[in-house]
Amino acid sequence: MFDSGHKYHRINITKVSEKLFLRQHLYNFRASKRRYIAVVEEYEFQVFIVKFFPVSHKLSDKKYNVIFNDFDAPRVIRTCINIMLDILAEKPLASFGFIGANTISNGESEGETNTQRFRIYTKLMLNFLAKTSFSHLEEPSISAYLMVNKKNKKFVELIPKIVEMFQKVYPDLIF
């Protein structure tokens, strides 16, 4: 089901000075019925957070929450995984994370705890970034997931530093 993604293109990489992350990597791709933007935020310690949204919602403050019945979600998600794998090929010590945004559909909003996206992404990450190579940390109460690369010689010491960094962004984070 998640066997193939869409062809994507890197748009640009922008250094960011006013945010907690260092750089923003932008990608775009066309799915079966719409175009998407994948935003990859690069943080200290080579941590990358991948987000995506449909271009048609780029100005919406709920752009990460919308869901469509295009029946293309597996390929859209796999495209983002492929972007992660490309980053990993470029930066072998890269670590990754995500927040599984709550779905807003037909005027109804899913809670922010253990969201549908979080549950799906969590299962996929275990398939694509194995526990033998990454330490997987999850916080279902805010649908947060972190994969720390074990190729970092001191990855055990790195985990609390990364968690502390993200607690500045997400104060409820309690890995």
Image (tube, rainbow, N blue to C red):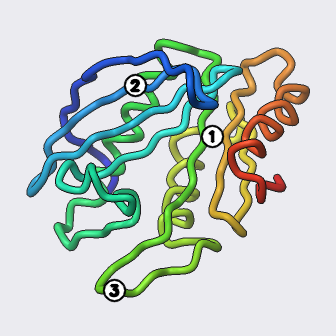
Mark in the foreground, 3 or 2: 3
Residue 152 location (% of width, % of height): 76, 18
Q: In the current view of this chain or complex, which residue is farthest to the front? A: 18
Q: In the current view of this chain or complex, which residue is farthest to the right? A: 157
User: Of marks 1 and 2, which one's residue comes earlier in the chain?
Assistant: 2
Q: Quadrant of the N terminus?
A: bottom left
Which residue occupies 63% across, 28% down?
47
Residue of label 1: 130
How far apart marks 3 and 1 lie (CA) works out to: 37 Å
Q: Is residue 2 left or right of residue 5?
A: right
Secondary element at image label 2: strand
Residue of label 3: 107
Q: Which mark is residue 25?
A: 2
What is the crowding at mark 3: few (fewer than 14 residues within 10 Å), some, or many (at least 20)? few
How far apart marks 1 and 2 lie (CA) works out to: 24 Å
User: Of marks 3 and 2, which one's residue comes earlier in the chain?
Assistant: 2
Mark in the foreground, 1 or 2: 2
Residue 77 location (% of width, % of height): 35, 50
Which residue occupies 39% across, 76% down?
104
Q: Is residue 78 above or below residue 109?
A: above
Taking depth in this image into account, of 81 and 111 the one nearest to the observer is 111
What is the crowding at mark 2: few (fewer than 14 residues within 10 Å), some, or many (at least 20)? some
Q: Is residue 70 left or right of residue 148?
A: left
Secondary element at image label 1: loop
